[in-house]
Amino acid sequence: MAAETVDHSPLPLGRQIQHILVKLGFRPRTAVIFVPYFWLTLFFLVPFFFVLKISFAQTIIAQPPYTPLFGPDSVPTHELLDNFRRLFQDTIYFDAYLTSLQLAAISTVICLLIGYPMAYGIARCAPSTRSLLLMAIILPFWTSFLIRVYAWMGILNTNGVLNNFLLWLGVIDAPLNLLYTPLAMYIGVVYSYLPFMILPLYANLEKMDVSLLEAAADLGCRPIKAFFVITVPLSFPGIVAGSMLVFIPAVGEYVIPELLGGPNALMIGRVVWNEFAQNRDWPMASVVAIAVLALLVVPIMFFQYYQNKSQERAA
Amino acid sequence: MSNRLSWFIILMLVVGFIFLYGPMVSVVIYSFNDNKLATLWGGFSTRWYPALLANDQMLRAAKHSLIIGVVSATFATTFGTIAGYVLARYRKFRGRTLFSGMVTAPLVMPEVITGLSLLLLFVAMKDLFGWPNRGLMTVILAHITFTLSYVTIVMQSRFTTLDISLEEAALDLGARPLKVFMVITLPIVAPAIISGWLLSFTISLDDLVITSYTNGPGSTTLPQVIFSAVRLGVNPSINALATIIIAVVAFGVVTSHILMTRAERRRQRDIQMALQSNK
């Protein structure tokens, strides 16, 4: 084919190479897709296989602290599922699981209960107020997560802002023990993740066709009923997106239990870190991580399904 | 439906915004507290601010964080723009489902899992190839990977809403695809690219968990320093640092909001004028 092109007209070398590459199946489009595809495969997908492999390894005192990944020594000499059996035998893991799930689920519901009316209110405001309020929701998102969690330490402290205020009001006689309690963790999670709930809900409610509600009103439907029969079902994709954006990261939350939950708050994200950093038991950390992942696969797929659907609709 | 919002919605908005902003306001107020026990008010003072500048450890950490933020945001924006373009324009190619999955999954993946898996990859790579050593390099690689998703989502929605007829017109007039992309597409989506960069920069600057997994001893970042200080309790110099961060973010967000509102108003006016001159 090269001879053919030379025969007709002396194409510049660049074009010739391009022709050859295209004939071989390397179209520019393929090259464009390749770069991010390769990156994500190498740094997002492949690492999970290492986690999986190491979860079967054994802890040894070495650098890195587990039996080799490859080579003749890499075949487990002990029972293959030892690490996984520990996951079910030691109640610490199971308890941490349950507390994490409970914290994430209840916080998601609270976020939805606070976030829905807020998103609804913003979406129904006059356009100028709307963009101002939206900015006010986004601003905390740009502010450091760590700083915002830390702010609650000053408020919930035994002699912190809230206790001083309540004492001054005369509601309580002695300072309440708020920091390092489960309550503090719930406040922290709801506070940190609330914008993640509001933004997808707002995006959904803003696009809603208000004439549907007018039609319902004309036909004699009360506003409250119209809200539950029309608005809520139509905003379902927003509810799913917001809830998943809160629930999934909250299950693995590490910073909030560490700062607000106190030493006894056993959360699964913390267990992974402790196994890794304190016990230097990397195989066990991998096992716990895989168990978390197995738990979250369904919600993550659910989230992606709705994400794709809404992107497709936008196109 | 009446346009007036019910009292319940207004009440929820007021309470919600107090809930969102109260803690930040309290940190700002207490950063001017003279008392060393940061929770008891001991008079007004700005003494914690100069103390920050004298804190070598914190300044070094801030430098590391800025380097990591700038480098990883730049790469993440480049890759994310490409990925967003691919997802918006190429409706069908082999492995599209996997690709879009790998883009959206890091958004919700708990950080402890992403961090651990990346660390294990780096350790295995070090074993096999003798590279990379844990430090700035590994943190940057990790940050590119997880901020890439945010940029991709921003760019994907920008490219989907882009009016394709502009590019088609340029193609009809004989411009080559690469030139069309550079001269037409890129300038139009530039604002989205800038906000994508800022988004990944901020997320990188703020990350603690993934950094803690992938970082080595010599390159501690600002969140790591803040975290090890605050887990011991409330700390006046952290209050001052937090106030600076909040002030910078608030300034940036409000300024960009004003600029965007103005640009939008100008655009509306231009459209109006164009319509009138056509009559």
Image (cartoon, rainbow, N blue to C red):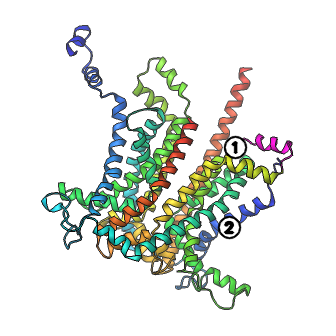
- When the figure is inspected, residue A259 is found, relative to residue B89, above or below; the finding is below
At 33% from the left and 33% from the top, the residue drawn is A31
What mark, if any, has residue A66 been given in the picture? none
Q: Residues within 10 Å of mark 1 (few under 14, many from 20)?
A: some
Q: Chain of mark 1?
A: A
Q: Is residue B12 left or right of residue B219?
A: right
- The residue carrying mark 2 is B18
Question: What is the three-letter code of the residue carrying label 2?
Answer: Ile
Mark 2 → mark 1, Cα distance in angstroms: 27 Å
> Farthest residue in the top direction?
A8
At 26% from the left and 25% from the top, the residue drawn is A24
Instruction: Determine if marks 2 and 1 fall on one subunit.
Output: no
Can residue A206 be seen in the rendering of this structure? Answer: yes
Principal secondary structure, stretch drawn in magenta: helix
> Farthest residue in the bottom direction?
A173
Q: Position of residue A79 (x, y in %)?
A: 23, 67
Q: Position of residue A208 (x, y in %)?
A: 69, 43
In-front residue for pair A229/B56:
A229
Q: Which residues are magenta?
A: A206-221
Q: Is residue A217 magenta?
A: yes
At 62% from the left and 56% from the top, the residue drawn is A198
Can residue B32 be seen in the rendering of this structure? Answer: no
Q: Position of residue B88 (x, y in %)?
A: 48, 36
Could you tell me which secondary element the residue under label 1 belongs to? loop
Q: Chain of mark 2?
A: B
- The residue carrying mark 1 is A208
